[in-house]
Amino acid sequence: MILAIETSCDDTCAAVVTRTGEIRSNVVSSQGVHSRFGGVVPEWASRHHLELVNPVVDQAMEGVDWEEIELVAVTQGPGLVGALLVGVATAKGLAAARRLPLAAVNHLQGHVAANFLGGFEPPFVCLVASGGHTFLARVEDHVGYETLGQTLDDAAGEAFDKGARLLGLGYPGGPALSKLAASGDSTAFKFPIAAKVAGLDFSFAGLKTALLYKVRDLGEAETERLKADLAASYEHAIVEALMLRVERALEAEHEPRLAIGGGVAANRLLRERAQSLGVPVHVPPHALCTDNAAMIASAARHVEPTPYPHYLALDAYATKRAA
């Protein structure tokens, strides 16, 4: 079995997954302390990971004998480097104490690999949309992926959070904005989706600015009255911007199949829109969309592990690169 640890942002996660992809445990401890600031404070995230990681690992290991663990896996990057270092150091310590091999996993590959746990096998096109990353990939095997398009500025989840902040909603903004949008009219306002921009890259900075200007033009009282319509129209624009590129990517595939990962994959409208494309679509359960360690274990099943003691010098990295 594989013990996996994920600490790339503000969720402290540990999971135990078998080599065949059976999830024995998948523990996530979210740090609500960041809500008062409207975003994640990196230093606080690191400190709370230090407090939480051992209890989270203990909880994930309940009912599992350490003798059953044959591999330790951990997110090496990308993410908040201080947060990542807590997970990497913990994983190295646990693995070294038992002379187990260690698998260093790319966080983005983890979001792709979450789909493998549901039995959705390559090849397929994968949309990963989260608070920190948005990209389209062609997945030909279990080991890696070919990036087809990526965000040029904000990620989709970041656009949700910033839009929610402009509308006076709480953090994290995505769920709050979507909940409000459910009672609004998505045709009330027209926001840009960069439909005429060629290619498969995404851009959400202009959309965020358009909402800012609309809120300014309406004024506080009018914005409050129309808040649900603004949320619904804004959500519609984000989803359509994503689906436009997805449709373009699928048109180039001989046998189009779509998988979705990342926190934004939990969005109801995105799921409905994806299911309407007329191709096989797989969306992981909500618990496997947001950051979790089961997806890291899933990716680790296809990573060449590093034997003891060669991983003791392993470091974390903050920016996207090969793991």
Image (cartoon, rainbow, N blue to C red):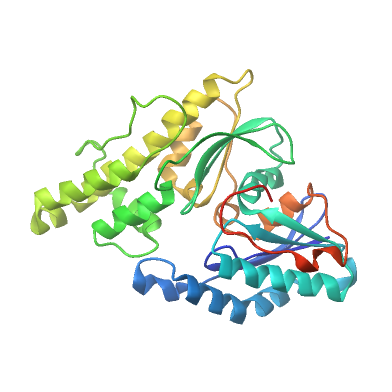
* Quadrant of the snapshot with the N terminus: bottom right
Residue 122: x %, y % from top left: 70, 33
Instruction: Name the residue rendered at 74%, 35% in the picture.
Output: 141
Question: Relative to 204, does residue 23 appear above or below in the rendering?
Answer: below
Residue 280: x %, y % from top left: 60, 29
- Residue 65 visible, this orientation: no
Q: Is residue 299 left or right of residue 20?
A: left
- Residue 212 visible, this orientation: yes
Residue 185 sits in quarter = top left
Residue placed most toward the observer, 287 or 246: 246
Q: Is residue 124 left or right of residue 172?
A: right
Instruction: Name the residue rendered at 48%, 70% in the picture.
Output: 42
Question: Relative to 71, does residue 208 appear above or below in the rendering?
Answer: above
Q: Is residue 267 left or right of residue 96?
A: left
Instruction: Name the residue rendered at 25%, 46% in the picture.
Output: 209
Residue 315 sits in quarter = bottom right
Residue 93: x %, y % from top left: 78, 75
Q: Is residue 243 left or right of residue 20?
A: left
Residue 78: x %, y % from top left: 59, 56
Q: Residue furthest bottom?
A: 51
Question: Relative to 45, does residue 110 appear above or below in the rendering?
Answer: above
Number of numbered labels in the structure image: 0
Residue 62 sits in quarter = bottom right
Residue placed most toward the observer, 9 or 20: 9
Q: Residue furthest front?
A: 313
